[in-house]
Amino acid sequence: MSADILALSWDSLDNLWAQSALKSVGILAAVLLPAGTFVYLFLFKMVSFMQSRLGPMETGPYGSLQLLAEVGKFLQKEDIIPERADRLLFKAAPYLVVSTVLLVYIVVPFGPDMTFISGAMTGGIFFAVAIASVSTLGVIVAGWASANKYSLMGGLRAGGQLVAYELPLILAVVGVVIQAGTMDMQQIVHAQAGGSIFGVDLIGNPYVLTQFLGFIIFMIAVQAELAQTPFDMPIAESELVTGYMTEYTGLRFLLFFIGEFASAGAFAALGATLFLGGWAVPAAWTDLNNNLFNLLGPIIMVAKMCILGGLIFFVRFTFPRLREDQLQKFAWVILIPLSLANILATTILKVAF
Amino acid sequence: MSEFLRDYLTVAIFAAVAVGLLALVLGLGSLIRPQRVQKDKYLTYESGVDPVGDGWAESPIRYYVFALLFVMFDVEVVFIFPWATRLELYGWFGAIEMLVFIVILSLGILYAWRKKVLQWL
């Protein structure tokens, strides 16, 4: 171990704790604000308008405080742990699901200097997909620990589905990594802003255009990772009574709910960074290292996240549910070979040009 | 401390903050929410009737096969990522190497398909 690694002074440590406190607040804002926005904007309002109704209107202007009212409701509910459940695992499962979602945001850059980590952790996107898959474990643990037949079925279905759709998700990301030549999220953003399509650099090179197949595969896989409607077999409320969450009540149920929407936000953030150019605008328009982008970056980022979030929830409320065998077959027989073909095509184009 | 280790220290701090915050929220919740013990509340839910047998019932073997398939592909992906960042240096050599690698793995999924593992009915 070199002296460089051990070179710890009180000064730098002090600085580190101050920074960490600030970053912790920042990451909570980055997780909870998009999650809350998604719930209000899409789950409450957009679906209501799609179904020709108004949605919540009583709490606050246009029902905008509905979410706080819901949290208040869940706070008052009794916490019930079934006597046959595995108590320790039953309590641990929400922690696993929610805390891993928070960690996904660490690698997402929100501006030229608005990053939670310095540039040294170069495996950014690799870290994100690795940590996102830990929440699968939380879901299986929740299903198992409840000692309920519905929960066990739901947990197993969720486990099978999440692992099956994680592969197309990761393989779609590989296409982006090949094009950018790096796993660092900040450099992927710069590669898109500064890139060019056939020599035209007017809009940079947002990978949604040059990796369109990868983008489609990514969004389908995200839909399945979130267990949203075309792929909501694990929580199918009409047959499994919300699957792995059947036995959860009150605050613990709310944590799963928050985890679901926070991970919708996290995947939207990953998708916006990988395919829509992240916090940046095309480098041909303006100087990206301008300090102004530390302020504008998060706003641009949230706008792009809302576009992807809107897409995710639009699909959720439009499509019917797939059968269990259909969705497994769809992943293994169509999506995975397609994403492998996408990798090969990207490789050949990258080497040839 | 090197930048690299500092980044992972940040990850550890965030994990601690996340877990601590959840514990705090659940702890505060326990001060507010009611607790009225009734024996029937703690029965396992089974559509309203008393639960029959054990909750940890048998489950289809298929999920195990899918898990094995997943491990195979997940290990593959671990190899693809570092290769993808260095593709520009390798050029055609790297492209053909990866072609061979992916074809061999596709044979794996083809074998699973032919063995009717991916079919349910």
Image (cartoon, rainbow, N blue to C red):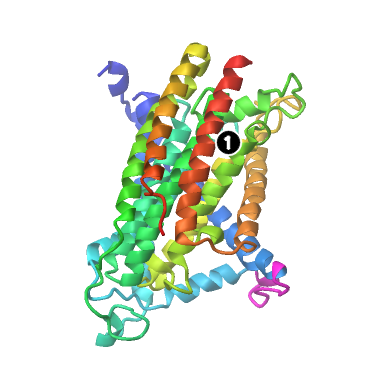
Q: Which residue has dot 1 on it?
A: A274
Q: Amino acid at mark 1?
A: Leu
**Is residue A299 visible from the viewing direction of this image?**
yes
User: Toward the viewer: B14 or A128?
Assistant: A128
What residue is shown at x 55% (from left), y 63% (from top)? A321
Q: Position of residue B31 (x, y in %)?
A: 34, 73
Assign the N terminus of chain A to one quadrant of the image.
Answer: top left
Q: Quadrant of residue A87?
A: bottom left
- Image check: A306 left or right of A8? right
Q: Is residue A131 magenta?
A: no
Residue B67 vs A148, above or below: the answer is above
Q: Position of residue B70 (x, y in %)?
A: 36, 43
Majority secondary structure in the magenta region:
loop
Q: Position of residue A14 (x, y in %)?
A: 37, 34
SS of the residue under disc 1? helix
Region in magenta: A50-63
**Is residue B18 visible from the viewing direction of this image?**
no
- Image check: B89 left or right of A42? left
Residue A68 vs A118, above or below: the answer is below
- Image check: A214 left or right of A81? right
Q: Quadrant of residue A150?
A: bottom left
User: Toward the viewer: A224 or A185?
Assistant: A224
User: Toward the viewer: A307 or A21?
Assistant: A307
Q: Position of residue A243 (x, y in %)?
A: 40, 67
Assign the C terminus of chain A to one quadrant of the image.
Answer: top right
What residue is shown at x 63% (from left), y 48% (from top)? A308
How many discs appear?
Answer: 1
Residue A174 vs A147, above or below: the answer is above
Disc 1: host chain:
A
Q: Quadrant of residue B121?
A: bottom left
User: Which residue occupies the extreme front position in the image?
Assistant: B114
